[in-house]
Amino acid sequence: MKLYKKILIILILLIIYLYVCNISMLPNNIILMQGELLNLNTIFGINVKNAETMQASSNLNNSIVDETGKMDLQLNLFNIFNVKDVTVSVIPKTTVVPVGKAIGMKMYTEGVLVVGMSEIEGKKPYENSGIETGDKIIEINNQEINNTDELIACVNSSNGETIEIKYISDNEEKITNVEPVKTAENEYKLGLWVRDAAAGVGTLTFYEPSSGNFGALGHGINDVDTYELIDIANRRISNG
């Protein structure tokens, strides 16, 4: 009799384990193209319902999804309690054109990237500011900085008065104050070498005609001065 109890307990634990494994292996987010089949690969007893309409699983799982947008699903065990929520995103079915052509690329950073430092008229205005090579300057005196021209204009307009700089260092926004130094050319500078873009070549793999969106295989790009991955805000391409 004790042997039967042990076997029964083992079987119950095995069934629980199978259900836990099946539930944990189901994704939290699914992306489908319009007209594709929704297949969650659930086992017996796990029912799928629309969280908004509570539509039964027979009308959802293993069925073709035609409407675009997001759909929140609930996975219920024997219709007793909820065991998991799944978000299904249905995107329009599109046709892409394969290309495989060499292109030129220009990538723009968020703000401007600090790639070096130097003395200005024997002074180091950046000293003790906390700004280091690899940081990104994103605002000066609450004005957004998108490129080097905007940074130069803001610094020159300060007329040598202390400016407030917001920058990103190690993925953390920080604020510091720097007093620009006047040069022999009557310009004001911070002693920082900055860059707002990087250029290179690549291969365009495909593009989508209606939107103009494109895709390309590639890898992360390290800045030649900082040796760190470039945080790209936007980019553009040109014919090779």
Image (cartoon, rainbow, N blue to C red):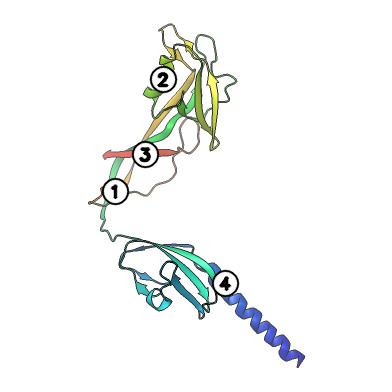
Considering only order in the chain, which callout, 1 or 2, is on the residue closer to the N terminus? 2
Please report the residue visible at 48 percent of the width from the left and 27 percent of the height from the top: 114
Q: Amino acid at mark 2?
A: Cys
Depth-wise, is mark 2 or mark 1 nearer the camera? 2
Depth-wise, is mark 3 or mark 2 nearer the camera? 2
- Using the numbered discs, state the Cα–Cα distance from disc 1 to disc 3 in whole angstroms: 13 Å
Q: In the picture shown, does residue 148 fall above or below 110?
A: above
Q: Residue 101, image x and y in percent?
A: 27, 47
Residue 135 visible in the snapshot? no
**Residue at which label 1 appears:** 213
- Quadrant where the N terminus sits is bottom right
Callout 2: 10 Å neighbours few (<14), some, many (20+)?
Answer: some
Q: Secondary structure at mark 2?
A: helix
Please report the residue visible at 50 percent of the width from the left and 36 percent of the height from the top: 228
Considering only order in the chain, which callout, 3 or 4, is on the residue closer to the N terminus? 4
Q: Residue 28, image x and y in percent?
A: 49, 63
Is 214 in front, or is 164?
A: 164
